[in-house]
Amino acid sequence: MTTISTPAHMPVGGEALTDEEVVRRVLGGEGALFEVLMRRYNQRLYRVARAIVRDEAEAEDVMQQAYVSAYAHLGQFAQRSRFSTWLTRIAVHEALARNRRRGRLTEMDAMPETDGSGVWVAKGPDPEQQALSGELRRVLEDSLDALPESHRSVFVLRAVEGLSTAEAAECLGLSEENVKTRLSRSRAMLRRSRGGGGARAPGRQ
């Protein structure tokens, strides 16, 4: 399989370009600029992939394959949606395909209780929270692992990545009403695991 590695430095000037401008220039022959898109979306793709496959190494593989697939089919990006949405959908499809191959696809309507390790991590942490960010991230991942697969991916895109309801719905191939319902259920399960209460998750409607 072809691999794409993230370099130590972005191409000069690439940071100022929009996604669509980068795509046009890559298709025009400036292949190195694809690195700009990888830098922008590494974190999002990793988080949504891990929410689905629940394995750090496999999430990395999903992210790598998503970039390979996106690069190979960049000419098919029709700009009817944002590039970030198109790319995220590729990662979601790859992660779900891996789960199906491994026989780990969770029943979509299953609603198990969390294991009591739930935690809410707000955006914009203070310095003390930043110092603990690595540990808190691991705890949050453990907590999300207790949610049904369909709810984890919704929660990550809406509450962690801050996508709008419409954007998350498009990424996941769901209706907006489905996204709202699953996000609400996810919040409720995480609040129950913390003994009630808790801050509302950020994210645009």
Image (cartoon, helix red, strand yellow):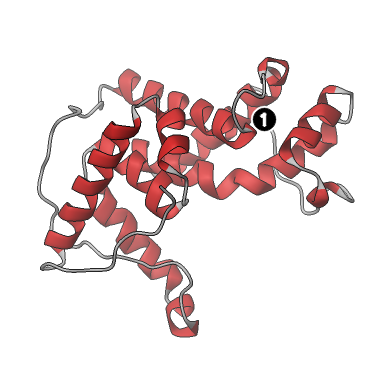
Q: Looking at the image, can residue 56 be seen?
A: no
**Is residue 186 at least partly visible in the picture?**
yes
Q: Residue placed at 34% from the left, 59% from the top? A: 201
Q: Which of the pair 156/6 is nearer the observer?
A: 156
Instruction: Please identify the quarter of the rendering in which residue 65 is found.
Output: top right
Residue at image position (67%, 41%) is 38
Q: Secondary structure at mark 1?
A: loop
Which quarter of the picture shows residue 173?
Answer: top left
On-image quarter of the N terminus: top right
Q: Is residue 133 above or below residue 76?
A: below
Give the residue at x 67% y 15%.
76
Residue 116: x %, y % from top left:
13, 61
On the image, the x and y values in percent for residue 158 come to 40, 47
Tell me residue 64's x, y (percent): 58, 34
- Label 1 Cα crowd, 10 Å radius (few <14 / some 14-19 / many 20+): few
Q: Residue at x 22, y 68 (%)?
A: 198
Q: Nearer the viewer, residue 144 or 25?
A: 25
Quadrant position of residue 109: top left
Q: Is residue 81 left or right of residue 121?
A: right
> Label 1 sits on what residue type?
Thr
Q: Position of residue 130 (x, y in %)?
A: 48, 76
Q: Is residue 80 left or right of residue 47?
A: right
Residue furthest to the bottom: 128
Task: Please tell me which residue lies in front, 83 or 47.
Answer: 83
Residue matched to label 1: 3
How many numbered discs? 1
Q: Is residue 58 above or below residue 81?
A: below
Q: Is residue 85 above or below residue 200?
A: above
Q: Nearer the viewer, residue 29 or 103?
A: 29
